[in-house]
Structures are given as structure tokens and as C-alpha cells.
Amino acid sequence: MKQDKDERLFFSAALNRGVVKSHIEFVKRNGVSLALLCFSLKLPEPKEKMFEDAVVALEELTDFSVLLLCEKGLLFTFLKDLHLHRAVQVAKNIQETLHKDTGVYMNHAALTIVDEEDSYDSLVERVQRYMKQAEKLGEGKICYGTAKYDFCTQGGEEEIFVNFFADQKKVTLYNFYNGMPLSEEVKVLGYSGGLLRLKTSLAKAAFLKNEPFTFLKHPLLPDTIKADIANAVPNRAEVVLTNLRFIDKSPVDRENIRVMPDEPIDVAIECADGSEIYGTIHSLAVNSIAVKLKNPKDADRCLSERETHVMLAFDLKEQQQKSAHIRISAMLFNREQDQAVFAIYPNHFFKQKIEGYIALQQSRLITIMQKMVLNFYQG
């Protein structure tokens, strides 16, 4: 019996190592973003039935990613095509939805992005270290970071900015035209006292003079930086930024590009009590939707608190005059008068449909911009 048990443990450990190593190799070959989530569960009685229910829910919530059971009851899974802060938001949604739907609670969790330089040992060591930090910080805590930046133990964002801008002399600057990102690589002139000085083009500096904020990205940063524009000097092609901070919902990443529909799109919001309220889509991204509510007073009973979970249903145009019906889980992110902003969590099929619609809208905006440029040069 002991020999059989030892053999099962051997093959279980070998299976886990092989699966994790295959994901590391996939990142190295394809240069994609992949997050590893490690967590423990708090199971009420009957434990076997509750664990089975939790696995069913977790598979759907992670788009049917592989789920590994490791030592001490820890579970590993992978979150595909996500940058760090977006992966953290998805992990928090998994935690909330799992408890709401099954009664099983994600007790502690660790999350990191798989780095192209990672080995199996370095990756597992990192998530184990984050798990210990999460356990010290308390129940429900998620600790996270990358191979270079540890958000649970380092001296906060300011220390990351000081170290990063001392090493890196170029970043990509982003602004938007009707939700479409316009990017430019710029030179870092210096960072001190919370102020970042950048060398831009003359046209970019003139544009930024009338903008309140901008966004910065770099492959070595854990996610997008949002910064307020303190000053822009067009004749020197320089801009000074202040109040730098990482943002949880980056508008720069492909999945976060936000477009406004060119015609009204009706949306039905199914509340927790089964009733429905209605609105139209103001703007749409792969991970969020802003809805203009038709009857804001009717929405008060349903959307009175942040992080309220609802279902959204609407139709999106596709190529050749077709339309796709979308029905997805959503969480209220913000509510102001007649507008509600929802974080959404589409499965792979619905994500493709939303990305297709965004691509159609982007093509329309590019055509408009080309006409504007042509009109400008023709005088």
C-alpha cells in the first residue's frame, strides 16, 4: 500500500512539473502574457461535494484552463493573455463569484506573470513566497508581482518608478482619439521628486498641452502608468508629468481599447432579484462596458452598491450585416447618475465577438482620421 501511495505521489508531482514547464515554454516560444494563479480554498461541509462544485465553477471562470492540485491542498491554474493588473482583477472576480455561487471561499492567493527567463524552480519559488506573504496579511488577501517587481514587499510604486526610470531611457506614450490609442516612443530626460520629464515630438507636445493626462507603457513595467500632465512646452518638444500611478484597468492594452458605437445598442441588465432594467451602450471594451440608463430611478434598487453582480444582454453588429447576441456576467464598477460602468468577464466565444466589433469601429475611425488629415493638407 505504501509503495502504491509513493508511486501516486511521484506521478502527481511529475505531472504538475510537466504542465507548468509546458506553459513556461509556451511563453518563451510565443511571447504571450500568461499569469499563474496559486490559491487555497476554505471548504464548508460536505467538503467533497463543495470541492467538486468549486472545480466546476473554477473551470468555467478560468475559460477551462488546466487546474492542478499541489502540496498542502494548494491549487494552480493559468490565466491566459492577461497583463498583471488585469489578471489581479480577474482573480478578484473569481474569488467573489466562487463564494457567491458555491459558498467556497478563496482563502489566500498568489499571482504572477510567467517571465520568459523563468525556470520551473524560479516560478514556483516566487508564487510560494507570495502565498506566505498573503497568509501573513490575512484572509482573502491576494499577493502579486512579476519577476522584477513585488507589490507585497517593496516600497510601493514610487520605489519602482525611481529604479525603472534610472535604468530605462525610452518609454511609449499613449493618448486617444475617440477611444483609439495613438502611441509614440519618447525619451526619458529624468525622474526626480515625483516629476517625469520626457522629450517628445513638437506635434505631440502641442497636443498634450490641452490634455489633462496621458499613459505610459514599457515591456519591463508590470502594467500601464497613468500620469497627469503638469506642463507641456511645444517649442522645446518637452512634457513634464506628475502623479504617476499604476492603473488596474488599462485603456492601452488591446483588450481595453474602448470604442463608442456609431448607432444605439440596447442593453438589458438582469438584476439579482430577476428583474430587468434597460439602457444603451455608451462605450465598449473587451473587459468593460459603460451603459447609459434609460430610467435611473428604476436602477437604484439594482445598482446601489459597487461590485454588484448582474447579467448583461445585447446584440453586436458583425460583418455582412449579421449580428451576435451577447450574454455575459458583469460587476458594477462605478455609477454616476444615469451612467453605469461594468467590468465584464466574457468567455472565449463572446470575447472574439466583442473584439470583432471593436475592430469594425476602429476601421471606421481610421477612415475618418484619414479624411481629416487629407482635408488639412488640401487646405
Image (cartoon, grey):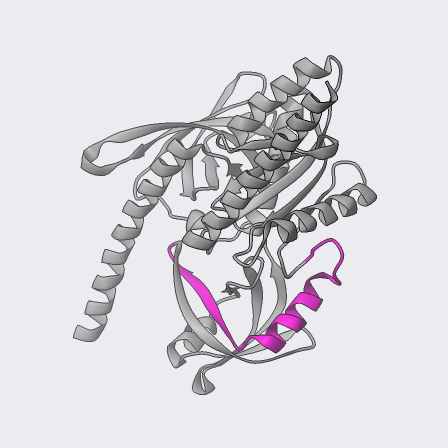
Numbered marks: total: 0
Does residue 69 sit above or below 114 in this rendering?
Answer: above
Q: Vertically, is 74 above or below 365? A: above
Residue farthest front in this picture: 3
Tell me which corner region of the image, top left, top right, bottom left or bottom right, holds residue 268. top left
Residue at the far bottom in the pictured view: 236
Residue 2 place in picture, x, y as percent: 74, 22
Above-or-below relation of 331 to 223 = above
Residue under the point 40% across and 54% down: 179
Q: Quadrant of residue 134?
A: top right
Q: Residue at x 65, y 39 (%)?
A: 38
Give the quarter of the figure containing the N terminus.
top right
In the image, is 249 to the left or to the right of 186? right
Question: Picture coordinates of residue 43 (x, y %)?
Answer: 73, 22
* Left/right of residue 282 with respect to residue 193 in the rendered view: left
Residue 192, how many percent across, how many down? 67, 78
Q: What range of the chain is rendered magenta? A: 150-178
Please tell me which residue lies in front, 93 or 129.
129
Image quadrant holding the C terminus, namely bottom left
Q: Which residue is nearer to you in this view: 107 or 115?
A: 115
**Residue that appears at 29% across and 54% down:** 365
Image spot of residue 372 (x, y percent): 24, 65
Is 271 within the magenta?
no
Could you tell me if residue 109 is visible in this image?
yes
Q: Nearer the viewer, residue 26 or 189?
A: 26
**Is residue 101 something one can see in this rendering?**
no
Q: Is 162 contained in the magenta span?
A: yes
